[in-house]
Image (cartoon, grey):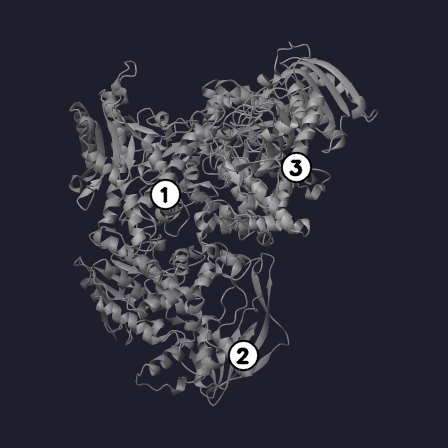
Amino acid sequence: MFNYTVETISLLLLPMVTTNKEALGSMGNDSPLACLSLYQPLPYDYFKQLFAQVTNPPIDPFREAIVMSLICPIGPEANILEPSAEQCRRLLLPHPILSLQDLDILKATRFHGWRTKVIDTTFDKTEGPTGLQNGLIRICNEACQAAKNNYQIIVLSDRAAGEQRVPMSSLLSLGATHHHLIEERQRMKVGLILETGEAREVHHICVLLGYGADAICPYLVFETARQLRHEGVIPSTLTDTKIFENYTAAMERGIAKVMAKMGISTLQSYKGAQIFEAVGLSSEMIDKCFYGTASRVGGVTFEVIAQEAFERHSLTYQERECDLWVLRNPGQYHWRAGGEQHVNDPMSIANLQEAVKNNDKSAYEKYKDSANESVAACTLRGQLELVLSSKPIDLSDVESAAKIVKRFATGAMSFGSISIEAHSTLAVAMNRLGAKSNTGEGGENPDRYLNQDPEFNKRSSIKQVASGRFGVTIGYLANADDLQIKMAQGAKPGEGGELPGHKVTEDIAATRHSIPGVGLISPPPHHDIYSIEDLAELIYDLKCANPIARISVKLVSEVGVGVVASGVAKGKAEHIVISGHDGGTGASSWTGIKSAGLPWELGISETHQTLVLNNLRSRIVLQADGQLRTGFDIIIAACLGADEFGFSTAPLIAMGCTMMRKCHLNTCPVGIATQDPILRKKFEGKPEHVINFLFMLAEEVRVWMSKLGVRTLQELVGRTDFLKVKKTEHPKAKFLEFDNLLKNALSLRPGVNIIGGSVSQDFDLEKRLDNQLILQAASVLNKKAKTVEIEMDIVNSARAFATTLSYHIVKAVGDEGLPDKSINIRLKGSAGQSFCAFMIKGVHVTLEGDANDYVGKGLSGGEIAIFPPKNVSSEFKSEENVIVGNVSLYGATTGRAFFRGIAAERFCVRNSGATAVVEGCGDHGCEYMTGGIALILGATGRNFAAGMSGGIAYVYDPIQTFPMKCNQETVDLVSLDDEDKKVVNGLLKDFQQLTGSTEASRIMANWSTEGSHFVKVFPQEYQKVLKTKKVVTASNEQIVKSITNNLEPKVMDIEDAVPDKVRGFMKYQREKGAYRPAVQRMEDWDEIFNFNHVRKGLRQQAARCMDCGVPFCQSSHGCPLGNIIPKWNDLIHQDNWSEALAQLLQTNNFPEFTGRVCPAPCEGACVLGINESPVTIKNIECAIIDNAFEKGLILPELPEFRTGKRVAIVGGGPAGLAIAHQLNKAGHSITLFERNDRAGGLLQYGIPTMKLSKTVVQRRIKLLEDEGIQFQYNVHVGKDLSAKKLYEEYDALVLSLGATWPRDLPIPGRQLDGIHFAMNFLETWQKKQMGNSLDHLPLSAKDKDVIVIGGGDTGCDCIGTSLRQGAKSIVTFEILPDPPAMRDFDNPWPQWPKTFKVDYGHEEVKLKVGQDPRRFNTLSKEFLGNNGHVTGIRTVQVRWEKDTNGRWRMDEVIGSEQVYKCDMVLLAMGFLGPEKSIITELELLQDERSNIKTSLGKYSTSVPRVFAAGDCRRGQSLVVWAITEGRQAAREVDVFLMGNSTLPTLGGVIQTLNQKG
């Protein structure tokens, strides 16, 4: 009713109530927008959080918690212009979350005469969907009247929701009430509190606060947690109080993070601020409930929202409740069979990987089709189609793919987030293409951009500059084609990031200029960008650092991004990336991944239009980025205004990524998103895979261009006239409005140049002071002199002094720079911003004067000394005056800086290796510092050392106020030891010599007393590293290994709560002893399975399951039923057998059958099987159901409601039994007609008893009978009973006839006796074993030489049966070649592995006679006989080769004839189709394979009221497919009979199906 799902509890609530933090996710958001979802999303999901980028900075809510406040005053607000005591009469809450007890108290309060009005936010279900709007009107009127009647608190409550009452969304109730009270001038009189069962996630609470809620009591969260505790899911030690505390702590962190990403520090400012954009809500909803909120594409109406509320309610209170074993899981976060579509679905992933590995164009076509289908289901662009030209051009006239790929770039994935192997593979691929790869924010080792082999060039053309400034040296900047400023990230816009210390390996530390084992934090803001002017400065700095590089700025799509982009363009950026909300590979909380940012389609369109309107488009090359998949996506992006195109996830998939979504756990099984050396060895990606993908993509683009009639991609840019909204029957997409999106930008300002990058930005570099500097230093640069002395005056308009000089030095001599003091520069005056930014080693600058902000930004080895003018008054005290501005030494990596005076705020932020001395600093000093030394000889501001994880700070604190100013969350304050004192003394001496500091002189002169006033700021993580280094005495590699293994994150992720489950796939080997020993089992007819042995290790085997984000085991390549395998594996690992049983029964009617006889395609598709043995799925399935039967948990369940409808089912095989079971649950009266004496079909008489005990089969039949299903045995419909008669007597007739027409072998001698169809042989023996009276001897293999023709399961069953009957010898012929030991290139994962397998019968025969019974490449030519009985088979060997068209051709091998002796031949070559009698009688249409014909994906035949399922419709297949067919056919029959059905679809997902689909 409130849309709680399995993911709601497991992914979101459990982490919050057990670990007091939000759970992490990764790999972006690829599920449908709420306005396209068919699984009744809540209204919150239509809202996307806005965030700060460029115009103001986001806040770090954790390291800078001193500025954050969630204090929540509620109640009447007095007029702030009339001060009085009434202003203080408000209730002050520490946070906006109320406990159940808190709410009860507020409801009953009479304190100070306050009264509370509770308003019901439900409506009677008899009102129908119109009850929603009527209810909102009623609520608004009641609230307004309550305010007028002097109630101080209004509680909007959905507690009355139940079977007869439908809850209105709390968000709609609140929004309507809030705006109505504002309109009526009553809002300030009351506090609005919500009592809601709906809201539970951080995003939900934030949206409620943003639209006017004063406080929220999410009662269902607490009641659910209680129930989970009762069920043992969470520890009993978690009391109600502790649950509330944990949940609110997590919620506080989440709310603070959401507020902070917009730069808002207090909840009072955030409440009612409506800092959201709606995607897919109509104007009627916006005007009523969310007035003033942007909703650019229109969308669903109240009627649709109301209908979805009704659907949720009806799913909760079903008249015919069936198959509600578990909570629904439609897969809104992770793909699940039968649930929401995702852009990255198993089929698309598999098709893409097959295409790129083999450069297979047909596989790419399949990928394109499946990907476009997913895009259409999930995205805005999927609702568009192309307007093809009436005059297409020839493909040869279209721009080449080689030119098109040069517009491609890979996304900013850092080395650290992905492995070095994956990172460098991308770089090699893009360099071969002439395209561009991106370093991401993690830096790049010089060995990757220096002296590279052109064929294996690992240099990333795009060097990113992010807030962490990891490894941003002058060498890094100088060796780039593009320098990209990352303002926001698609995966989590407005947020920072963190790489925990245990992931910081030696290589990563070297690349990022930090220390192995020390954690690294990326702050949310660039601390040198608090405004558009600051961004312009950084753009200028980077241009100075590399004058030939293109300067790029990465933004994320949101409303207003076009205006921001215009400011960025005016700030002289040359390239802008617009990322969509759905991209991103980085780890983040699910709130950030799912709920922030907008689709790139909106961002690109707005940016292009706004740049054109301001005549800025020609200056900017515009790139679209975010889940781009196919050529269609590229065309759409270009038409909306993009010049270039960024790819992140797709290239990773091309290299082998399976979308595990476990990147944050360091357990990527394919070696991509991990730093684990063992897992990295599993990486099999090659540059060719990425190249193949991008070239096939470009070729697809070319095909589209030819159809559109354009020759170059540039002609497509901005051509929205090539796009139109496609006609759709989608019940929600039809409400979307694309007029604004498709507006042609040139209509806004005709005639403007829109060729991106055709007009160069003017940076005025020719006017720089550096030009004079470079001329004067030319002798050193040309190696004609070793040193040079330079004197100059400087003014504050001279920005980025010495930066371009450093660029020339690094290009001349490399990253190491020059010997110390090769270039000595003495300056006088006031320096401008970014003084000595990125200055390289060998340059020494002395400034007599002062400097503006960003002094020494990115210092790369140079030395700076700044001191006041020497002619200043003797009364001037440098230690009391600011000498350098804000954010000095931001991101410095090496070098030294001495400032005689006070540094303003954020001194040494992210210092990772420089040494600095200063006489005082402002707030936030040494924030995020990871290395180097900072000596502060005076007072500091607040929040010193926040987030500091490495390096050392020494602070002179004679008045002992520093501890109050220091953020001690990550650091300890300790006294100086002897080594520290030496360091400090040395720095004081250097400082005094370079700057003439009187403060340094005084301290040194009185060291015996002043020395004791120093405090050492020592990061805790750094201490651990140093301690570890002392303990380890081995090599450097061993030291790093110890650091990596012994340092753990401070707070474990929820997934780490059971460590052996997280890494179980690495720790445990697959159990391979599923069968009893062959020597033992071949002597009896008991089941071959070693049940007791298997169960002993079942929890370990379950721990091998990785709970994939995209579980291929339940995809179309895996389990046709969509068995919820990851979930029941996890439950078995937890020893929760009862819940595992519920998960199993949700999808599978007869797991006792599939767990025994299914060949387990799920295991063939298991992700673990890519590079090692897959998870043991089948054994676990069998153990779950057998355990349930043993413990008496499987009992008859009769439906509570009977519909009065009668259904006849013909055929009692697995499909027929599944149909009967499902329709009986739905309340229909079922009669099943079986031509044999027992039901079960091949389960009963086709599969031998040692593989499937007939006791197991009959146990299930008895259960079905007890549930009310009528079985009519020995009735051969079509012969004994007319099919037409059944058709007339029953409301529906379902045919599940099976495929019983065996394939024959019509070769000479076929008429001889002793040649039998395998099924006749097996059936006769099964009937004999069941006690039937019949003569089985003619079909007995006892003392005979048996030849089985045909492989597969049936052939193996014939082998096992013949052996047990006492056959003299057994040989089996297979016409195909013997399979390879490993997958061939044309049999890629996750297809069923066509590899050599030894089943039970093969093993048993080999044990008895010494060799495998199979003879491959064997073609039977003639049956030989004597006296009318078969005595042998003449055979020939065949050779298989591919012809010129790539098709397999069989040729006989000359001279390979051989005669095999035999007394019995069993033909096990499969089946051709169903028997014809019923088909003929009912005049049913058949397909080309003689199966009963139905529409694609449907089960209704050409005759009304007649349905078909199983092998008679699908063709010969597996038992698991038959059950699947039966379940889905039953769903369709139920809809036909009742108008709708809630029988589950694939994956056990309950979704109402009606006659419209």
Mark toward the viewer: 3 or 1: 3
* Residue 173 placement (x, y as % from top left): 25, 33
Judge whether residue 1311 can be spotted in this image.
Answer: no
* Residue 1117 placement (x, y as % from top left): 45, 57
Q: Residue at x 42, y 82 (%)?
A: 1084
Q: Check disc 3 and report the residue beneath it.
A: 978
Mark toward the viewer: 2 or 3: 3
Q: Nearer the viewer, residue 27 or 1297?
A: 27
The quarter of the picture where residue 1118 lies is: bottom left
Q: CA distance from mark 2 to mark 3?
A: 77 Å
Name the amino acid type tagged 1: Asn
56 with respect to 759 (left or right):
left
Q: Check disc 2 and report the residue beneath it.
A: 1406
- Of all residues, the one furthest to the bottom in this rendering is 1427
User: First in sequence: mark 2 or mark 1?
Assistant: 1
Name the amino acid type tagged 3: Asp
* Residue 117 placement (x, y as % from top left): 18, 31
* Residue 528 placement (x, y as % from top left): 55, 25
The quarter of the picture where residue 1216 lies is: bottom left
Q: Check disc 1 and report the residue beneath it.
A: 246
Judge whether residue 739 can be spotted in this image.
Answer: yes
Q: Are marks 3 and 1 in contact (CB under 8 Å)?
A: no
Q: Nearer the viewer, residue 1308 or 820?
A: 820
Q: Nearer the viewer, residue 387 or 983?
A: 983
Q: CA distance from mark 3 to mark 1?
A: 44 Å
